[in-house]
Amino acid sequence: MGGIVALAGGVGAAKLLRGIVKVAPEEDVIAIVNTGDDIELHGLYICPDLDIITYTLAGIVDEVKGWGVKDDTFHCLEVLKRYGYETWFNLGDRDLATHIYRTHLLRMGYSLSQVTDEIRKALGVKARILPMSNDKVRTMIMTPIGRLNFQEYLVKRGAKDEVLGVEFEGVNVAKPAPGALEAMERADVIIVCPSNPIVSIGPILAIKGVRETLMETKANVVAISPIVGGAPLKGPADKLMRGLGLEVSAYGVASLYRDFIDAFVMDSVDEAQRKHVEALGLRVFVTNTVMRSLEDSIGLAEEILSMIKGLKQ
Amino acid sequence: MGGIVALAGGVGAAKLLRGIVKVAPEEDVIAIVNTGDDIELHGLYICPDLDIITYTLAGIVDEVKGWGVKDDTFHCLEVLKRYGYETWFNLGDRDLATHIYRTHLLRMGYSLSQVTDEIRKALGVKARILPMSNDKVRTMIMTPIGRLNFQEYLVKRGAKDEVLGVEFEGVNVAKPAPGALEAMERADVIIVCPSNPIVSIGPILAIKGVRETLMETKANVVAISPIVGGAPLKGPADKLMRGLGLEVSAYGVASLYRDFIDAFVMDSVDEAQRKHVEALGLRVFVTNTVMRSLEDSIGLAEEILSMIKGLKQ
């Protein structure tokens, strides 16, 4: 068995992954995670998507917010504010330990993928978690007020600025993390999680060799639409897609992935788009894709994996 | 007025300083603080004595422990432990903000004295607080199990090892912090706080130019004994003094300082040593030196400053 590879952003991906690891052997799962949203704050190196995935699989995520550690406190942040730091990016006290540890190991010369592996092992996660790259890639959003890094655009300014363009700074020289392409080549199944196609999956696809490997792999590649009923379940995917002149729909997402996916999963409310997506040359599965509970996640993961068995290799 | 300069270690010095700033204009007080106990842990730069002094003067110190921030939580430390860090050095969540801020500014190229000044200002402290040096000096304790840095000796191993020697690593090339010698030259009064004479005051005195400046200054220099009734009020001063072959007594402390102090303050319980200390050529004041409350601190500070007025310049 070549395992399951998941291309992942933050909350949507984490919700699907928590189901996948219940219906497949967890140690056969490899998540390749967006790091375009990473940010350095207060001298600490913060990887929001890696942390969401890791905390979720470790069972310690704050399930209400979808990020951070559950029952966390924010005492350190209160004092950082006294020191004049901007505190629009919430950092819980327990969560801070991860950033302190990561920053420390990176300064000692560990690569981000080594650090990520140490963190998931320490938190008892059996699935492997890979950053998309050990090199720095920064998702920048062009807006009328200027060029913003993604966290500034999303968290600090609440995604209120018009999107004029998106750029993945550094992506031209970034190499895939060691083992990432090999995992995609070897996999039985590659799942493109229901994450923001522009700023979560987009940076992963933009890394040299990723799109080519997805096109050439013998694995069945399936994507799940993060757009349900014409809107994202979470986050600013609609604003970003619209800003780039894309249709904000399941179809719009499918057309972004059409050159490397075999199948596309979309929500029942979007049934009407089925033919349209099939016309892209894709197998289409329609089901309930909204994951409110762990049971929803397990149900969707089961459906996806059994659908894939029905695809010809 | 040339102000009051205090040579300071941790808790004992902080208790006297909280009194001094109530009986003299706070902005006329300059504390020059030991940094030989500084330690880097988890990639963070920690200055225990600077923090104790700053937190105490800011009114946020944990008064029961004498260090750390009051009502602090230890949630980050719990998770750092999961990451395999040794957690014998207690770091509260609020306290961590100081270490994160300091580490960040140092990495950006600020000097330790600049960082220390930013911290005290942010916390609303009007007294100036100077590290003894911007250069790295590390107090190392020679023991039968080897060379330990001071925090390992004190906190990790509970000061249980026999002391064979003490060394201030780096002191030969360390320069006094900018303004430290000038403050001592200009001061009306220099107070050697009731801190450990070996590992708190000792490193400050070992910095090039400090002892000479203390001998030459026109200020009245007065020391307060940290040894009361033959034992330190707090900490391992007795073990360190004994290890170095010194008498563990007020007299023992006075003899360490005799070449640069004009007067010596010791506790009433040590009245019997008065003549002995006077024989060193020092003016001796005997009073209650144990500071249990803020009122005690204010009372002692008042007594010291009025005694000094009686000394000839």
Image (spheres, coloured by chain):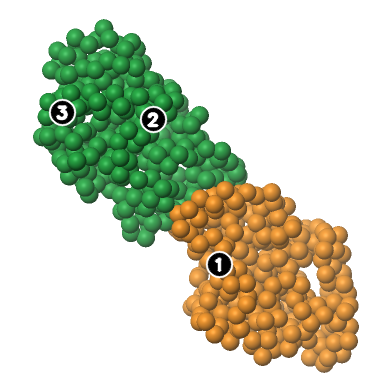
Chain colours: A orange, B green
Quadrant containing the N terminus of chain B in the rendered view: top left
Q: Residue at x 53, y 41 (%)?
A: B92
Amino acid bearing label 3: Phe
Nearest the camera: A258 or B242?
B242
Relative vertical location of residue A175 with respect to residue A105 in this rendering, above or below: below
Measured in 3D between alpha carbons, the distance from the residue under mark 3 to the one under mark 2, in whole angstroms, is: 23 Å
**Can residue B248 be seen here?**
no
Relative to the observer, which residue lies in front, B312 or A52? B312
The dot on residue B260 is 3
Q: Amino acid at mark 1?
A: Asp
**Residue A65 locus on image (x, y percent):** 71, 60
Pinpoint residue B269: horizontal percent, then vertical percent.
Answer: 33, 10
For marks 3 and 2, the one nearer the N-term is 2
Residue A62 x, y percent position in the rendering? 71, 55
- 3 or 2: mark nearer the eye: 2
Q: Is residue A45 left or right of residue B150?
A: right
Q: Please provide percent x and percent y for residue B276.
A: 19, 10
At mark 2, the secondary structure is: helix
Q: Are marks 3 and 1 in contact (CB under 8 Å)?
A: no
User: In whole angstroms, how far apart are the C-alphas of marks 3 and 1?
Assistant: 55 Å
Q: Is residue B184 left or right of residue A18?
A: left
Q: What separation in Å lies between label 1 and label 2 (alpha carbons)?
A: 44 Å
Instruction: Specify whether disc 3 shares its chain with disc 2.
Output: yes
Res B16 → quadrant: top left
Residue drawn at 12 percent across, 34 percent down: B218
Marker disc for residue A38: 1
Return the chain for callout 3: B
Asked whether, in this view, residue B212 is left or right of residue B83, the answer is left
Helix, strand or loop at label 1? It is loop
Q: Amino acid at mark 2?
A: Lys
- Which residue is denoted by mark 2 in the rendering? B15
